[in-house]
Image: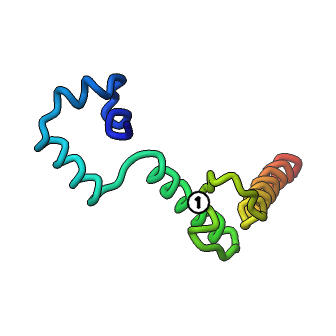
Amino acid sequence: MLLAMTLGRHDVDAMLREMTAEQFAEWEQFYQLEPFGPWRDNVHAAMISQQVHNVLGGKAKLKNFILDFSGKPKPDDGWVRALRAWSDVRQCERDARQAGKKA
């Protein structure tokens, strides 16, 4: 299903009928080297979030930003604080611009 979604195919059965066993094996090998799909996208987003958080003065590990779809509630792992810090920076920038316009 993931391969069909990645390739933009809506009919998984048709895709598999058209694909040779060798092609399918190549895709499996490629996935082992370069995983793709929603899980990988989640990791990329987590990496960016971690960097933003740490640049704003936090100290967090990547695992703190990986989305968890297990259904278990998690305590705040820092993303709320990072978002608030970013918001504070933006407010300071707006205040500085306003002060410059009044002067």
Residue appearing at x 77%, y 59% in the figure: 80
At label 1, counting other C-alpha atoms closer than 10 Å, the crowd grade (few under 14, some 14-19, many 20 or more) is some
SS type, badge 1: loop
The image shows residue 11 at horizontal and vertical percentages of 33, 23
Residue appearing at x 77%, y 64% in the figure: 76
The image shows residue 6 at horizontal and vertical percentages of 35, 37
**In this view of the protein, which residue sits in the foreground, 76 or 28?**
28
Q: Is residue 99 above or below residue 62?
A: above
**In this view of the protein, which residue sits in the foreground, 91 or 65?**
65
Most extreme residue toward the right, as rendered?
102
Q: Determine whether, in the image, residue 12 is placed left or right of residue 83.
A: left
> For residue 67, which quarter of the picture?
bottom right
**Colour scheme in use:** rainbow
The image shows residue 24 at horizontal and vertical percentages of 19, 42
Q: Determine whether, in the image, residue 34 is placed left or right of residue 96.
A: left
Q: Name the residue carrying label 1.
A: 66
Residue appearing at x 24%, y 50% in the figure: 28
Q: Amino acid at mark 1?
A: Ile
* Quadrant of the drawing holding the N terminus: top left
